[in-house]
Amino acid sequence: MNARRRPLIPRPRHAASRTALAGAAALGMLGLTACGSGGTGETGGGGDAVNVVASFYPMQFLAEEIGGEHVSVSSLVEPGVEPHDLELSPRQTAELGEADLVVYLKGFQPAVDKAIEQSGVENVAEATSYTEPLEHGSGHQEEHEDEHASEHGEGHGEEGHAEEGHGEEPAEEGHDGHDHGGEGGTDPHVWLDPVRYAEVAEGVGDALAKADPDHADDYRKNADALAGKLQDLDADFREGLENRRTDTFITAHAAFGYLSDRYGLHEESIAGLDPESEPSGARMRQLHRVAEEDDVDTVFFEAAAGERTAKTLADDLGLRTDVLDPVEGITDASPGDDYFEIMRANLQALRKALGAR
C-alpha cells in the first residue's frame, strides 16, 4: 500500500458512559476547528497528506487504494478487534472531527454514526449512499423460501423449512432475526457484492476529489482502476459458480446476503448476528432439513469465530466444515492478506461446497 496508516486503539467493549461524556466534551472543544485541519492532525502523520479516518477495514481498503500516496488513512478498528461493538475513546471521537474525510458505513457501528453526527466533519463518504441497499431476507432468499413453502410446507408443520424463524421459538438469533444494527433490517455487508462495492469505490473517489481538489484526477483514476478490478472479481464469481450442484450454503453468521443476491445463492445462517450465540433447538432441526433437502455438504464458519457451533451441526449431519470470511477485518487467521485475496479464497470455498464444475 502507498498509504500510511496507524490503527487507532478502541476502548474495551464495556467502556460505559464515561467515554460518551468525555467524547462529547472533546467534541465541544473541537467545534471551532473540526473542519479546518488541512490534513495535519495527529492521525495524518504530518505533511500535506489528506487525513482520512475509516470506520473499519472495508472502508479503510477503499480509502487506501483510491487515495494512494496523497492520503494518510487511520482505522477506528484495530486488526483482530470485532468491529460491530466498537466504542470510541475521546481521542478517536476528537480525531473524527479533525479529519479531512471520514469514510464509513451507516448502521454498522452505531457509536460511529452518533460520533459523526456530533463531529461537524465537513467531508463524509457514507457507503450506502452510493449504491442500493439490500433488505435482509429479500431477493433470491425470499424466492427460495417461497419455493420450499410450496414444495415442503404442508408436510413439516410448525417447524418446517418454509417456516424458519416463524414457529413457536423466536427467531432473534436465527437468520430472519439478523439486523446487524441496520435500520429496517437493511443488510450492511455491501462490500461482499463486488458490483455494489465498485459503486461505493466510485463514490469514495468523488468524495476524496471534493476534499482534495488538487489531486482529483488521481483519485478518480484510482477509483476507476479499483472498480475495474472489482468487475473482474465479479466475472470470476459468475464463471466460478456456474454448473453448481446446489444453491444453498450454511454459515455461522448471516453476513452473505449481498453475495447470495448477486449470484443467485441461498444462505442459511446458524446464529444470525452473533456467531458465538446459541441457536435454538428448533433452528438446528430446521437446518438439518435444509441440509437434507438442498444437498448441502458443508457448514461454514468464520476464520475468527463460529467454529464450535458450526462443527457441532456438521458432526450431527456428517458434513464437513470450511471457512467463509466476511472480510470485516484482517487477522493472522484470515485466508488472505487483503480484500481480493480473501474474496477469491471465499470463491474457492463456495465452489467446493456448492459442487461447481
Image (cartoon, grey):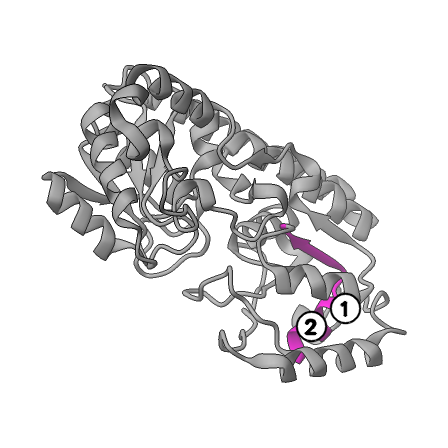
Magenta segment boundaries in residue numbering: 90-105
Q: Amino acid at mark 2?
A: Thr
Disc 2/disc 1 C-alpha distance (Å): 7 Å
Is residue 234 found left or right of 41 in the rendered image? left
Q: Is residue 195 above or below residue 213?
A: above
Decide if residue 212 is in sight here.
no
Residue at coordinates 71% horizontally, 81% vertically from top-left? 21
Residue 289 horizontal/vertical position (percent): 22, 31
Residue at coordinates 35% horizontally, 50% vertically from top-left? 271
Q: How many marks?
A: 2
Q: Amino acid at mark 1?
A: Gly
Please tell me in which quadrant of the rendered image residue 201 appears: top right
> Which quadrant is home to the C terminus?
top left
- Categorize mark 1 by other alpha carbons within 10 Å: few (<14), some (14-19), many (20+): many
The residue furthest right is: 32
Residue 105 horizontal/vertical position (percent): 62, 50
Is residue 172 found left or right of 335 in the rendered image? right
Front-most of residues 313 and 255: 313
Residue at coordinates 32% horizontally, 47% vertically from top-left? 252
Magenta span contains residue 223: no
Magenta span contains residue 102: yes
Decide if residue 22 is in sight here.
yes
- Residue position for label 2: 93
Is residue 134 found left or right of 95 in the rendered image? left
Q: Secondary structure at mark 2?
A: helix
Q: Secondary structure at mark 1?
A: helix
- Residue position for label 1: 97
